[in-house]
Image (cartoon, rainbow, N blue to C red):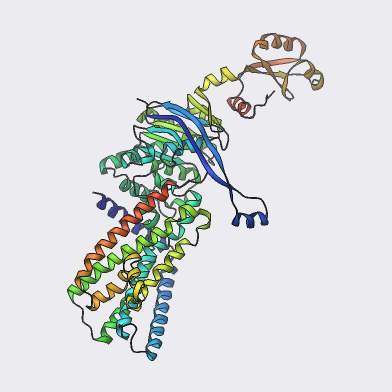
Amino acid sequence: MAVISIKNLKKFYRVHQKEPGFWGSVKSLVERKYYNVEAVKDISFEIQEGELVGFIGPNGAGKTTALKCLSGLLYPNAGEARVLGFDPWDKKHDFLKQISLVMGQKNQLWWDLPPIDSFNLNKEIYEIPDKQYKKTLAELVELLGVGDVLKIQVRKLSLGQRMKCELIAALLHSPKVLFLDEPTIGLDVISQKKVLDFIREYNLRYKATIILTSHYMGDIEQLCKRVMIIDKGQLCFDGQLSEIIQKYADHKLVSLILNKEVDLKVVAKVFPVKEFNYPKLILIVKREQVASLTARALQELPVVDLSIEEPAVEDIIRELFTGEDYA
Amino acid sequence: MAIKKYLKIYSHLIKFSAMTEMEYRFSFLLEWLVEFFYIIASFFSIQVLFWNIKEVAGWDFNEMLVLLGVNALFSEIILGVVFVFNLRTLPRKIMRGDLDLFLTKPISSQFVASLWRPYFALLPSLFPGLCMIYLGFKGGNFSFSLVGILFFLIMFILGLIMSYSIGMIIATFAFWLIDSSDPLPRLAEKVLQMSGNPFSIYQGLWKIIFLMVLPLAFMVTFPSMAILGSLSLWWLVPAIILSLFFLKLSNIFWNFGLKYYQSASS
């Protein structure tokens, strides 16, 4: 049975429209026009135990709304959501003790106190037995390497250290399902990597089912085999990351290193140029033309080195969203 | 056992609040000073009142002092435990979606919204209230009895529960009013402040209203009468019934409000 399942989920927000400016504000005191913002139009999917799935989409696509429906924070207007056999909206304690929601910018640790105090409080909230608590805490601290900061006030920690402690606080009760909303936002490169490595390790070790949303394609690429692309409240794609490249990228990138300056205008008349920064010239070529165009480039241009690559997933996704041809 | 869990959690919360506030040492001193001056001012206004009259709706000067002291204790506790860091910030928390992180935890959201951060510095401010009660007893030659004190404590706690519930119900309207609801907790405080007047000043329909609909009588007046020995023990029965009723009502209403809660966008 699927651990997470969503069927025809629909969620809209009622927002009031205010005219700009001072008189707009005065007017809205007296008369308000409401309209619906459809955050999630119709989404269905199933996730099995132990999967690490990525949600990608532009801002306002409905990713966070979907996560909130799955964690019981929002009540769907239509459709149904089931996690671990529960209806998240009921917020049954048995259900809540098995899930965890981590939102990148929101903190649950007490600011003026050392993290260990907040951890101890969570122990009571989740009713974690002493032995299990000590064991889990030790494992998490070791995995994230924060043993020396447990007793330092949270406000004195760096953002990276704080985020790691936030993760620990969220995982002390060994949740089976983890919802991570932009967990690496604002972190430096090194901390990002540590957090991602940790999530991967956690998923492998504890077979936790994880849904991760991120703006950073790097996060998704490193962690998730399966991705779901959500745009304008709908599921555009649900499958393997590698599939996206195959299906949507009908181009390849041919990178040439030149040893003589060339006139870009002349070159562009013959070859599909994406970027030129002497000595590097990047061509964007349709898959079926790669062989013939490469052969021609080698003949007509002063090439000393050449490589043929898949386009970046990021570019593909961007093209999907903006519908623009990135060529 | 749920009660044990919440007591454990609350003991942590008290400790945390104390630790957090002790970083700001002056707040304790200031709190004590402010309360001290406030009580002196209230004492003086009662004194001035009684230069002109002999009694207020059956309450003489010393009995009024006791009422004043109980009122000071009562409001300090309700404000410090429920309002200062909790209900007063509820409208903003709802607007910003700060409740989210708690709604996904196995803990009562009403508990979190109303009791999460007790104001630890309220402790020293209880002292002036106690002094006032003592003064009233001494001046009126009343005597403390074990039964009286016990009766007082029970009625006092039940009164706190009723006050909490009413405050909670008013603050819950923040779910619907959202961006206009900042003044709601203050409104609740003002309503509850009326409990500081002796109940006997009300006549006719108001008597019934402030006894059963908005049970102000039970909050400060009845505990004061209990410790003065002028309240019949039978009042325990309606006190228990009403406090449980209003507490349950606040919980039902809170859950009702939650349904309409839309967490703010990320």
Q: Is residue B72 visible?
A: no
| Residue B163 appears in the rendering | yes
Percent coordinates x, y for residue A132 in the rendering? 28, 39
* Quarter containing the C terminus of chain A: top right
Residue at 31% from the left image edge and 69% from the top image edge: B211
**Residue nearest the viewer, comparing B39 with A133:** B39
Q: Foreground residue, A76 or B95?
A: A76
Residue B38 lies in quadrant: bottom left
Q: Nearer the viewer, residue A158 or A225?
A: A225
Q: Which image quadrant for residue B238?
A: bottom left
Q: Residue at x 39, y 41 (%)?
A: A170
Q: Is residue A236 left or right of residue B206?
A: right
Q: Where is residue B56, by image quadrant?
A: bottom left
Lateral position of residue A187 relative to residue B87, left or right: right
Residue occupying the far bottom of the picture = B51
Quadrant where the image shows the N terminus of chain A: top left
Question: As displayed, is residue B221 above or below residue A250?
Answer: below
A160 to the left or right of A314: left
The vertical placement of B207 against B250, above or below, is below
